[in-house]
Structure formats: C-alpha cells, structure tokens
Image (cartoon, helix red, strand yellow):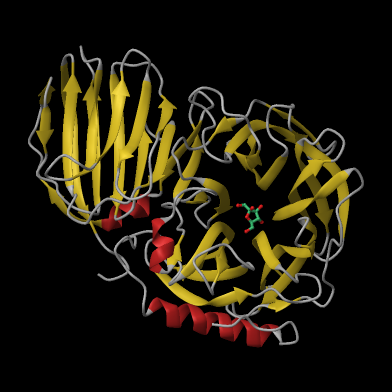
Amino acid sequence: MEKVQMNSTHEERIKQATEAVREQAKTIDSTYRLGYHLMAPSGWINDPNGLIFYKGEYHAFYQHHPYDATHGPMHWGHAKSRDLIHWEHLPVALAPGNAFDTSGCFSGSAVEGDDMLTLIYTGHNVTDSGSDEFFQNQNIARSKDGLVFEKATENPVIPQQPEGTTQDFRDPKVWKHGDKWYMVVGSTEKEGRRGQVLLYASSNLSNWVYLGVLAHSDGTEGYMWECPDFFELDGKHILLISPQGIEAEGERYLNHHQTGFLIGDFDYETLTYTRGTFTELDFGHDFYAVQTFKDEKGRRIAFGWMDMWESPMPTQAHGWSGAFTLPRELSMSNQGRLLMNPVEEVAQLRKEEVPLDIEAVQDEEVLLPLAGEMIELELSLKTGTTTECGVKLRCSEDGGEETVLSFHAKEDKLVLDRSRSGKGVSGIRTGLVEASESLDLRIFVDRSSVEVFVNGGETVLTSRIYPSEGSTGVKLFSRGGDVQLSSIRGYRLKDTWSE
Ligand code: FRU
C-alpha cells in the first residue's frame, strides 16, 4: 500500500494506516505468532510507548510501521486491556507527516492531564537522508475519548535540544510530582560524546523549562541514552536507560544495545541525583527500550520490546515483527536489589496444570509430560553435587532442536543457549545468580519466545526463539551429580488471541 502524501490530514493518515494494518493482518503467516504477548495485528513494532492506566483500562502504545514488517516512518500503534492479559487492538494513534514530525513519531509517554489522555512524543525530522542528518523535538497530542488523538496546535512544545548536546534528543518520559510536570529526555553530550538524560519541568505540559542534566555516562556507559524512565520505588529513585554504545566485556553487554538501571537518590529541591552503577535489567538476547507506569494499585509495571535492533527476525518474511514482553512488576528486595517478576494477573493464562511427579534428576536427562508451544514451568532445585543442571525447552524428538537453560554451579551463572533454537538465531547469554544451594526458576515459553525469572526476579533472561512447530518437548537434566526438586509445577497456557 502506498504511503500517504504530506498534504493529507492526520485523520486521513490514521485511517489509511489503520486500514493497511487490518488488510495485511488477513494474509499474515501465523507460524510464530505469540499466544499471550502483545503484538501488532501486522507490520513492525519496536518500543513500548505511552503506557498508562486511564479511566479503568490499561493503554499500551508502541512504535509501529503499519505498512511493512521493517522499521520505517514511525507511527504509534495502540491497544487496551482491562487485565493486562487480554488486549484489544485500536486504531493507529499517531501518524507522522506534520511540519514538526515529518519523518516519524518517535518514542514517548502518556499522562492524564485536564481530564484528557495526553501523549508526549519525539518528532523525528530527517533533513538529509544521505548523511543521516536530522533534528528531533518534543510534541504533544491529546484525546478526550482515549481513542482519537489530536496533535496540539502549540507543537513543538520543545523545539530543539539544549546547547552542548547533539541532534539525538528523544524519548520524553513525563510524570507529575507535587503540582508540576517533569520530563526526562535521552541525549548525547556534544563534547565528550557521552550518553545523558536531560530534565525539564512544566506547569501545563505545553511550556517547558530546561533544568539541566539529570545523569550522564561515566565514560564507559555509552554515547547515547535512549528511552529514559525515572521513578521512585521504595524510597529509591530508579533511572532506567537504554544506552547505545556500551562495549562488550566478556559475557556482558553482548546485545547490539543494552537496557539497564541506576539506583539512586534524587532531591527535587536541588535537582541532584546521586546514583550507583549501571546494571542490566534483563540478560537475554531480546529486551530493549523498557518503559514503566504506575497503575491504580500502586504497582510499577514494566514492558520491554521483546526484540533487539540487529536481531534476526524471521517473522519479517511473515508480514509482522516485534512484540512486548510479559507485563512485569518492579520491586525492591530487602537487600536493595531491583526485582522484576510477571504481574500476578499472568496466572490467568494457566489453562491446565500438568502433574509432574518427579523428585530428583540423577546425572541424566528426563523428558517431562509437559509438551507444548505455550507453557509455564515453575521449579525449585537443590543443586547438590551437580556441576551443571537445567531445563531444555522446545525440544524436537530427534534432538536436533532445543533451547538450553543451564545452571553452572561453580560459577553461579545461568546460561541461555539458543544455538539450536530454530530459524535464524544463535548465541548464548549469561545471567549471574546469587551463590546458593538452591535455584528457583519460573519459565514462560510462547510460540517464539522464552522468559526466565530466576530467584524471585533477581535475574531475568528474555530471548526470541524460532523452533519448528513440532519441537515441543521439555526436559530436565543434570551432569556430574544429583539434583533434588523441592517443587515443580507445569501448566499449559492459553492463547489469549484465539481462546
Ligand atoms: C529505541 C529507539 C528510540 C526511538 C525509537 C524509534 O529503540 O531508537 O530512541 O525513539 O526507537 O523507533
């Protein structure tokens, strides 16, 4: 389908994009379509945007290219849910093509202001595609019904980046503190090419005052900090960032870009942020551009983009690509560690428990009676004398395909190996776990994804996999000794899109 010309109205562009997505959805190849994760009906998606609980419903927006399964002029796709589990697709919310967002409506956030759902997003404007010259600004769009969005006449609300920063000026995240609005924006310091986060304030969402740099890279933490998010959690101030350009270091930072957090303290009077070191939030192959929001129960809920720039995406040939992770609740442990666990509503996905009567694995491999493309497995292991133990997921009968999650007892690390996970993908990722005799795993498998929550959310690994439909086996294994199972539970999960 042809893209709309710049002289059309926003309403016309929205209509055309929404129709294109619906039309393409009819011919999509559903082989790897996820059963219980949020995806667009068709086309490309990347970052979660505008997450908000608004008038009794959860709204999720996402970076979206409605006309193709590759990244292109960014729109905002839109879906809503009453329970974070069952999603309803809505018309495309934002289409680029106004004077201030000629080439894309890039990432941003949502707030409720003046009884309206207000989106704050980056206008991306390419000035010379040959030399990658562009400018970025911040804009708002409002909706009375949470469905149809009108770009504000006062756009751009922040026309350009502050002095001393580069053209990279994007991904506004807005929140209210007291009677003021605050905004963090991702940026690069011109002089040292360091990633940084800028802070702004406003009394009305339209007029913004630049307050300064909230935090910046120490020189090893990347040249551009994308998708910042800043919030208080149990008395601490967490800054989430997605830095570009952190160098790989052994088994760390192997993805094209990283997503992680800083834990610190912020003083709204002096606007100073004292912070700890950068830590990855998820150690899998496919987790980026996480965004959070606070819901009506006071929970801090996060969704990540369950893919990664430069990752192989075999579903592009099928007419779609990109998905959200499961909704995850962030909390702080008593020891001051940031934990990430699936929200409790995820238990609604359980369609049937499969009895798993097994107490130990003794230097062997055991096939569980829990075959399926969509399953949850919850287990507590006493690692005993074993040197290596774990779970093999999405195994084929002939042993040719499997995704291996193995705990290496001596090094206290958990390795997710997708060398034999099916189409396109490869490579291992490693998560460190606290030294202990026992290990708790909660594993979610969907048609083309694996999410592993370790020891109550201290470590998380998320990766896309593309096994054959028939590769549905699950095995436990141990090497060099015995593993005791203090508990094990398996469930078949619902396809929320069709059941
Ligand atoms: C992060 C990102 C953002 C940008 C958006 C464009 O994945 O690069 O910085 O706003 O994607 O789609």
The correct choice, above or below, for 370 with respect to 18 in the image is above
Location of residue 241 (image quadrant): top right
The one of 289 and 468 positioned closer to us in this rendering:
468
Camera sees residue 175: no
**Residue under the point 75% across and 86% down:** 7
Camera sees residue 332: yes
**Residue under the point 12% across and 48% down:** 354
**Residue under the point 77% across and 65% down:** 125
In the displayed structure image, the side of residue 73 where residue 326 appears, left or right: left
Count of labels in the image? 0
The correct choice, above or below, for 284 with respect to 483 in the image is below
Q: Quadrant of ligand 1?
A: bottom right
| Quadrant occupied by the C terminus | bottom left
In the displayed structure image, the side of residue 355 where residue 428 appears, left or right: right
In the displayed structure image, the side of residue 102 where residue 397 appears, left or right: left
Residue 138 image position (x, y, % from top left)? 78, 61
In the displayed structure image, the side of residue 53 where residue 481 appears, left or right: left
The one of 466 and 157 positioned closer to us in this rendering:
466
The one of 243 and 87 positioned closer to us in this rendering:
243
Residue 479 image position (x, y, % from top left)? 19, 19
Location of residue 273 (image quadrant): top right
| Quadrant occupied by the N terminus | bottom right
Residue 127 image position (x, y, % from top left)? 82, 64
